[in-house]
Amino acid sequence: MKRDSTIKKVVLAYSGGLDTSVILEWIKEEYGAEIIAFTADVGQGEEVSEAKEKALATGAAKAYAVDLMKEFVEDFVFPVLRAGAIYEGYYLLGTSFARPLIAKKMVEIAEREGADAIAHGATGKGNDQVRFELSSYALKPDIKVIAPWREWDLKGREDCINYAQARDIPVSVTKEKPYSMDANLFHISYEGGILEDPWAAPPKDMWRLTVDPEDAPDVAELVTIDFEKGNPVAINGDKLEPVALLKKANELAGKHGVGRVDIVENRFVGMKSRGCYETPGGTLLYHAHKAVESITLDRQVMQLRDEIIPKYASAVYNGFWYAPEREVMQRLMDDIQTAVTGTAKLKLYKGSVTVLGRKSPNSFYRQDVVTFEEDNVYDQTDADGFIKLNALRLRIAAQLEADDSEPLPLSHYIE
């Protein structure tokens, strides 16, 4: 494959692992380009602190390690939570909305450093290549993208190890885990390896953020979550900044084994893929949010929003975070959330989240209307005409099906 000779400087999304360390050297060799390594800290843990030194030791001309956790939670986690978005009934989209933030910062650094291209280590089979590149093109239409897994002749991990050893690339090679994982402050995703068999159970020691529900405490824990305009602002009455709040939610839900999901999903590139996701705090906040919505949203508004959720979730999953349709849907979702202020009370126990109560100053719930006891605000006889009007088409259809006679006069059905 002929390389683009105009590419002289490249910003590489760098994790410090085997793949991106090999990619760093490969781009230098194949393109003759200067490499600027970029590691985004979205809460994935200890690897961030080492990545900058590793990148420089591997031959990067410059290296960035940027703490993006506040922006990640405020501008990506919370908007998706406000939208109530979930993909194919289970997936809370943690990796999907982390990629556009990383791409955004890569483009910013490319512009600051005068780079000609960006590069990433996503494979040619997955969703992440689409998310990185759609986001990058949306933000900088003339940016060039290098995707080595679509260009080189290395076939897998063994080839990467041999490549690294032949060039003295400083990477620690250990026994490969029977799966791959990607972590951020919101969740951890697991796929590949043993998980490629949809009949095989995930290894018991795979999970990192949650205890096994069978080993979770035998005593349930009650938690309250406060919301203001759709955003969580307090846990158990304690006001917390967004990052601290998500960490606290992870801690509480994780110790009770809440937030594990094992699904076969439909990738945007056309194949089905088995993925396991661990989202303890996100699962707790999702259910708490729905509880407060249940008393603060008008019925028709909620139904309209629920019709839009699959489109919104697909847009995020497929990499269209910066697309106009996602932004339009987000504005609608956020407008709907202006009344979603209140408190949810939940029980955490052995992997489950159960809503025990909800309250709000904006509640549509009226006990004096819904009560089975005597009231002065609802005339039950009104229901008779309501039901007959709604039954009109059903009764006509049934009569026509019963015989071929002429329809009876309307007065027959509504008197």
Image (cartoon, rainbow, N blue to C red):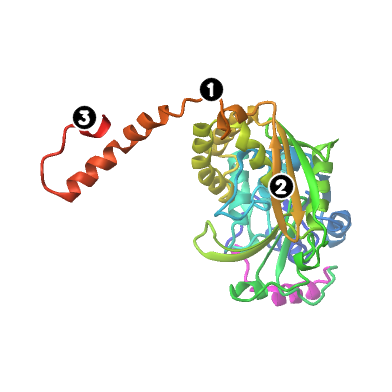
71 or 400: nearer the viewer: 400
Image coordinates for residue 69, horizontal then vertical, percent: 79, 44
Determine if residue 303 is in view.
Answer: yes
Alpha carbon separation for disc pair 2 and 1: 55 Å
Badge 1 crowding class, 10 Å Cα cut-off, few under 14, some 14 to 19, many 20 or more, is few
- Asked whether residue 162 is drawn in magenta, I would say yes
- Check the image and report above or below for 61 versus 295: below
Please name the residue that numbered disc 2 is placed on. 102
- Check the image and report above or below for 159 versus 182: below
Disc 2, SS = helix
Res 74 → quadrant: top right
Amino acid type of the residue tagged 3 in the rendering: Ser
Region rendered in magenta? 150-169
Please name the residue that numbered disc 3 is placed on. 411
Could you tell which of marks 2 and 3 lies nearer the N-terminus?
2
| Residue 4 horizontal side relative to residue 58, left or right | left
Please name the residue that numbered disc 1 is placed on. 377
